[in-house]
Amino acid sequence: MDGLLRMEVPWWEVVLRGVVVFAVLMALIRLSGKRTVGQFTPFDLLVLVLLGDAVQGSMIAGDESLQGGLLLAFTLLACNQLVGFATARSRRLEVLVEGRPDILVRNGRVDRRMLRRADMNIDDLQEAMREHDVVAMEDVRLALLEKDGSITILKRKRKDEG
């Protein structure tokens, strides 16, 4: 019972480790692209779970006390709140952390370079078109890969639609 309540490392080290791992993982996830975040496949979920397991030891430093775990949880949630607070107040930081939407299709023309950069293929785009009830590429006015990884499709207006 004594090990449950006694921390093995100083409290500030748990906080520092949590902040560093949070920052590094946030950067890695940001660099991995929007598709990773927005369109989870079973493989992506597996990588996320293994990633959490891989960094667990780095954050807690062998401290398995109740206080250490709760302090680490608090630290990670505080980091998340701080990033949200800062990005809501700074457009530059928001773009750095969250990115911008990418234009995949404009007026029926696919930007294949942008598709490759987003690690997407034409099948992914066509799936999103079907979800938005768009059959032909010519009917797409704009297709955006949003910051959250979702795809928004805006239809072209046809002359007969008024």
Image: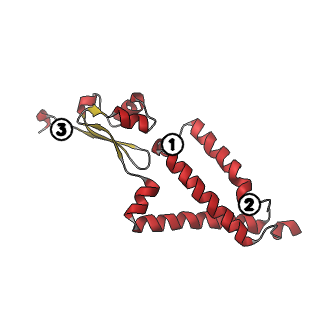
Q: Residue furthest right?
A: 2
Q: Amino acid at mark 1?
A: Thr
Q: SS of the residue at dot 2? A: helix
| Residue at 44% across, 49% down | 148
Q: Nearer the viewer, residue 65 or 14?
A: 14
Count residues near mark 1 (Cα–Cα under 10 Å), then give few for <14, some for 14-19, many for 20+.
Answer: some
Residue located at (52% from left, 68% from top): 82
Element class at badge 3 = loop
Q: Is residue 133 left or right of residue 32?
A: left
Dot 3 or dot 1, earlier in sequence: 1
Q: Position of residue 19 (x, y in %)?
A: 62, 63
Sequence-first tag of 1 and 2? 1
Residue at horizontal 57 percent and vertical 65 percent from the top: 79
- Can the viewer see residue 1 in this picture? no
* Residue position for label 3: 157
**Which numbered marker is on residue 60?**
2
Task: Mark 3: give few (<14), some (14-19) or many (20+) Cα within 10 Å.
Answer: few
Q: Nearer the viewer, residue 27 or 45?
A: 27
Q: Which residue type does callout 2 highlight?
A: Ile
The answer to whether residue 49 of the structure is visible from this angle is yes
The three-letter amino acid code for the residue at tag 3 is Lys
Give the residue number, with chain letter if any, for mark 1: 36
